[in-house]
Amino acid sequence: MAVKGGGRGRTAAGGSGRRPGRRPGDPDTRGAIADAARKHFADKGFAAATLRAIAADAGVDPALIVHFYGSKRELFLAVLELPAPAVSRVGQALDGPLESLPERFAAAVASVLSDPDLSRRMEAMLRTAASEPDAAATIRAALGEAVLRPMTARLSELPGVDAEEAALRATMIGSAVAGILFGRRVIGIEPLASANPGRVTALLARAVRAYLAPAAP
């Protein structure tokens, strides 16, 4: 026998038939999606992360993510950012006397390498940048603003080093760090992949010190 007054769109248990989770109009919905997306992209990389899994973590329907962002690629570009702790550590390393900058900078890099969460997030960014031109452009701009520009400013303090030379040296130091992360985390080149972070720090400091030499006459 049918139940009178049940109303359309209601389940036998008396529910509304609506999927549980945040309502599209909730003010924290976008933030929840962004947080879940950063986590999944960092843990799995762009290719392996799925909108369905991100939506499940955020408590929304996958269609809502498409409504807000259009596609997984657009979502990735919207939430892509350098890990704040890594940027902060490098920024602190750039402060202080130039004479000890190589050791401070190398120690900051080593702290990122030895931090499982930060190194995983950097790995995800490197993997995606290698295959997604738009992501590479976004990462390049972020690195330029947060790391390369202040490093260039510090290196321009060296005797005889003009702005162009300082920028070149800064990008070469940055490229060396990217190479270390790529070799250690992405393709696993030995013995770099399993080397003690302290040993990597010492060798990187020596390499950075070479870029602090005054300009050739």
Image (cartoon, grey):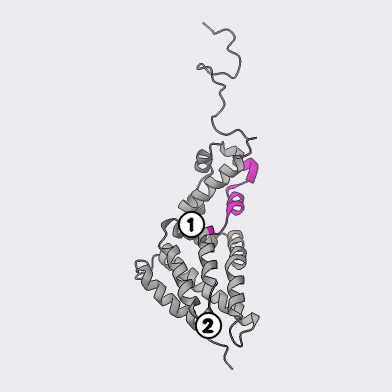
Kindly check if marks 2 and 1 are in contact, taking CB atoms under 8 A apart as contact: no
Q: Nearest the camera: 46 or 172?
A: 172
Q: Is 96 included in the stretch rendered in magenta? A: no
Q: Position of residue 43 (x, y in %)?
A: 46, 52
Kindly state the secondary structure of the residue where label 1 is placed: helix
Amino acid type of the residue that numbered disc 1 sits on in the rendered structure: Arg
Please, what secondary structure does the residue beneath circle 2 have?
loop
Q: Tell me the residue that label 1 is attached to.
A: 121
Which of these two is toward me, 84 or 34? Answer: 84
Q: Earlier in the sequence, mark 2 or mark 1?
A: 1
Mark 2 or 1, which is nearer the eye? 2
Occupied quadrant, residue 113:
bottom left
Residue 76 visible in image: yes
Other-residue count near label 2 (Cα within 10 Å), few / some / many at <14 / 14–19 / ≥20:
many
Residue extending farthest front: 96
Q: Position of residue 59 (x, y in %)?
A: 53, 36
Magenta segment's dominant SS is helix
- Residue 185: horizontal and vertical position, in percent? 42, 63
- Which of the 4 image quarters holds residue 61? top right
Q: Residue at x 62, y 64 (%)?
A: 141
Horizontally, residue 200 falls left or right of residue 128, namely: left
Which residue is painted at 45% across and 60% down in the image? 119
Does 56 sit left or right of 63 as displayed?
Answer: left
Spot occupied by residue 26 in the image (x, y as percentages of width and height): 62, 35
Check disc 2 and give the amino acid type.
Leu
> Is the residue 60 above or below the residue 194 in the image?
above
* Residue at x 51%, y 38% (from the top left corner): 56
Q: Which residues are magenta?
A: 66-84
Q: Which labelled disc corresponds to residue 204? A: none
CA gap, disc 2 to disc 1? 29 Å
Q: Which residue is mark 2?
A: 212
Report the quarter where the C terminus lies: bottom right
